[in-house]
Image: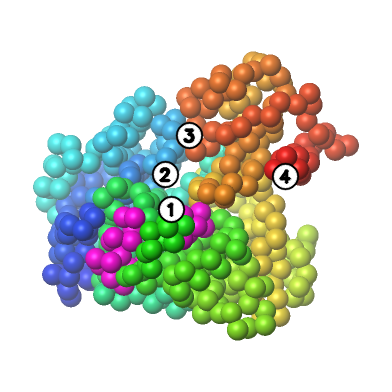
Amino acid sequence: MNLGIWLQRQAQAHPARPALFCGHTQVADYAGFHESAARIAGWLAGQDVAPGDRVAIFMKNCPDYLVALYGIWYAGAVAVPINAKLHGREAAFILEDSGAGVCFTSPDLTASLAEAAAPRRAVEIGSADHADALAHDAVAAPVERRAEDLAWLFYTSGTTGRPKGVMITNRMLIAMSLAYQSDVDPVTHRDAAIYAAPLSHGAGLYNMVHVLAGARHVCPASGGFDPVEIFDLAKDFGSAQIFAAPTMVKRLTEAGKRLGETGEGLRTVVYGGGPMYLADITEAVDHFGPIFVQIYGQGECPMGITALARADVADRRHPRWRERLQSVGRAQAPVELRIGDDAGQAVPPGVHGEIMVRGDVVMPGYWRNEAASAGALRDGWLMTGDMGFLDAEGYLTLQDRSKDVIITGGSNVYPREVEEVLLTHAGLREVSVVGRPHPDWGEEVVAFIVGEAEPADLDRLCVDRIARFKRPKAYVRLPELPKNNYGKVLKTELRKRLEEER
């Protein structure tokens, strides 16, 4: 099944329903949304894009992002959304690895792709090429696709620092969307999804269920997250839903308290993508009320492992409400959840182990990477690499992240990737990158360095090679890095040092 069918059905049944908005301004109803997507699909076919081919989107949030996404699906192609925060070189690697020959870009991002000599065809939103695509003959209907066919190729860095393409099928997205209705937050056509977080990630994954329901899709005019703008849009549209990283929830709460905003019109805030501190979510609920739902997922099981219902988030009467609030909830409907020992065998409730999940939301593997796929999948189970435990009631609590990922402002930073860039400087002998707690961003990147390189030179190196949010915010010079008997750097000791300095 092609996900584009959901948009086609809405256009057939409710063509005049409001669909796409830039700020407060409506730019398309469902008939217009469908028509534009169908024209993009016709244009892609004219560019020799066949079913199964990859087409990238390297754009900031705007209504044309969703038009391009559904145009790709209507053509039977595979969408490759790329984080707009990435450096042109990083985006170019994804384009090359995925084999995407066409890429839709925002005007201010096209130049960075040109510097990286990719892709074969860049279509800048608002350009003559884009106008030609929107004027092209429309396809009659979305191309037929099977449930197991790829729909989305999501690139996430692994511990080696090399991005891996998570293969996301139509079946996975269908199961995830239906689980949203059953386990997260039922959607109707009266609702409005405000896309304040990147459409290339979690926020974009939730567009499908809102299309299925015929809801409104609102891209803030700023193109990003501004609490004042969110409050204003929520009041105007009413029954609004946003997906937010924990750091965004914290900023929303601080702004609400400072400005006297009660969150009028905000029906649901779904949070995930990083650790939520108990004090922060307690303060948020105390100020805004029972509007919060938590989800836990990975790129390899997008948005679909567990959910902590709004009743659990807001409950203060249960004797174990704090423990529940510190959990990430219970398994979502389409998956099985297990805590495994070193051999992957299930352990009893309360016992610490690796979080394992299987079901229709779990990936079939990584794009053209059999070795990584074999390491992540075991007898149908996804080995998440996260550690935790289940209680007797089925609530999952995360304890450790076995991978040393740093989550800053809701975006993942993989230390090895930053370390490899820094080590290209001739003046560095060793480097180790860790996360340091930050009151606004959750964590910030800190690099421990051994050598004579100057921080300003290292900064310039990072700016030239990787996205700015991955750049270390501090450099700590050491005579040598702490290591164990096997020569492995003890990052726990480095984190302990940072904590002592705080």
The mark nearer the N terminus, 1 or 2, is: 2
Q: Name the residue under label 2.
A: 83
Q: In which quarter of the image is residue 494?
A: top right
The mark nearer the N terminus, 2 or 3, is: 2
Q: Which mark is residue 201?
A: 1
Q: Mark 3 points at which residue?
A: 468
- Asked whether residue 247 is drawn in magenta, I would say yes
- Measured from the top left, where is residue 1 in percent x and y? 35, 67
Please tell me which residue is depicted at 44% across the width and 70% down the height of the picture. Answer: 288
- Measured from the top left, where is residue 222 in percent x and y? 29, 47
Q: Residue 499 carries which label?
A: 4
The mark nearer the N terminus, 4 or 1, is: 1
The residue carrying pointer 1 sits among few (fewer than 14), some (14 to 19) or many (20 or more) residues within 10 Å by Cα, namely some
Instruction: Give the alpha-carbon distance from disc 2 to disc 3, as whole Å.
Output: 12 Å
- Measured from the top left, where is residue 179 in percent x and y? 45, 73
Tell whether label 2 touches label 1 (CB within 8 Å): yes
Q: Give the range drawn in magenta.
A: 228-253
Q: Which of 192 and 56 is in front in this view?
A: 192
The residue carrying pointer 3 sits among few (fewer than 14), some (14 to 19) or many (20 or more) residues within 10 Å by Cα, namely some
